[in-house]
Amino acid sequence: MRTLFYGLIGALLPLSAFTGSAFAGQSVNYTVGDADYEGYSASASGPSKGLVLVIHDWDGLTDYEVERAEMLAAMGYDAFALDLYGKGNRPVETGAKKAATKKLYNDREKMRSLILAGLTEARKSYDGNAIVMGYCFGGAATLELARSGKATGIAGYATFHGGLKTPEGQSYPKNTPPLLIAHGGADTSITMDHVAELSRNLEQAGVPYEIQVYSGAPHAFTVFGSSRYRKVADEQSWAAFTDFLTTNLGQ
């Protein structure tokens, strides 16, 4: 698949507007500990090619992740967009977004447990191998899970303009599944130095990986409708991800 499905569909619609779509998308309420969370599930219309777990950006699970889940369902995958913040917690102001991510960066054990809880919820509808992918903060969370080595049945990890730093004291297990890193060459938030450092860490660990760098693409280059959106880089990175899914889920 070399083109995007929806353009700006859903950019301004609430999460509930996608419930009952052509790809059986619906909000999913679940509990982790004593807290309520709200994810989004979109199922393939026919036999599923596999499961894709989508991890949201720093503003929480919004229409953007819903749209990506719907795109994956249209491609024949079961997709589940998890919630790391809690039901109804979708920060809008920059300060609130920073505070929400800081809580999880400061408690990485909780971050990992919430991702694993989302994976468990996703597997209630599809119990098979999965690809974990994330955007921006969600990309950093994706790599956090990869380094933990705690997730089973994972066929690969993918990040789009995600955080790439390896925290002090962490490393990638040698049996980490393949990684795909989609990065903007003009990203000033996550620099090429971070890319190079990640490459060195993965080489040292013997982890299979592919890093795609898109010229002129700034941070958040896949976000539909934003000033940072770059159509060519978005379509190229989605095509690379499509190939990654096919290769690692065997469909």
Image (cartoon, rainbow, N blue to C red):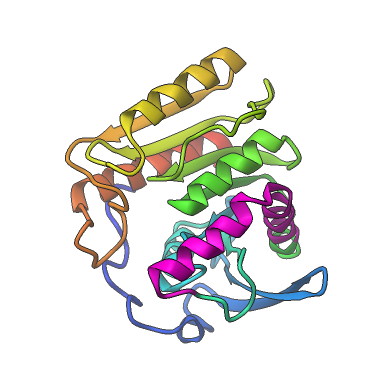
Residue 249 in view here = no
Q: Nearer the viewer, residue 102 or 180?
A: 102
Residue 169 in view here = yes
Q: Looking at this view, name the residue that lies furthest to the right.
A: 33
Measuring from the top left, give residue 160's x and y in whole percent.
Answer: 40, 46
The image quarter containing residue 226 is: bottom left
Q: Nearer the viewer, residue 95 or 58?
A: 95
Q: Which residues are magenta?
A: 91-120
Determine whether 231 is above or below 37 in the image. above
Measuring from the top left, give residue 25's x and y in whole percent.
Answer: 54, 75
User: How many dots with numbers?
Assistant: 0
Quadrant of the snapshot with the C terminus: top right
> Is-magenta flag for residue 107?
yes
Q: Nearer the viewer, residue 43 or 101?
A: 101
Which residue sits at x=24%, y=67%? 225
For this view, does 153 lie left or right of residue 212? Answer: right
For this view, does 198 lie left or right of residue 38? Answer: left
Q: Main secondary structure of the magenta part?
A: helix
Which residue sits at x=62%, y=63%? 84
For this view, does 218 lie left or right of residue 162? Answer: left
> Is-magenta flag for residue 97?
yes
Which residue sits at x=22%, y=39%? 186
Which residue sits at x=22%, y=56%? 228
Determine whether 142 is above or below 227 in the image. above
Q: Nearer the viewer, residue 197 or 1?
A: 197
Measuring from the top left, give residue 170's x and y in whole percent.
Answer: 65, 30
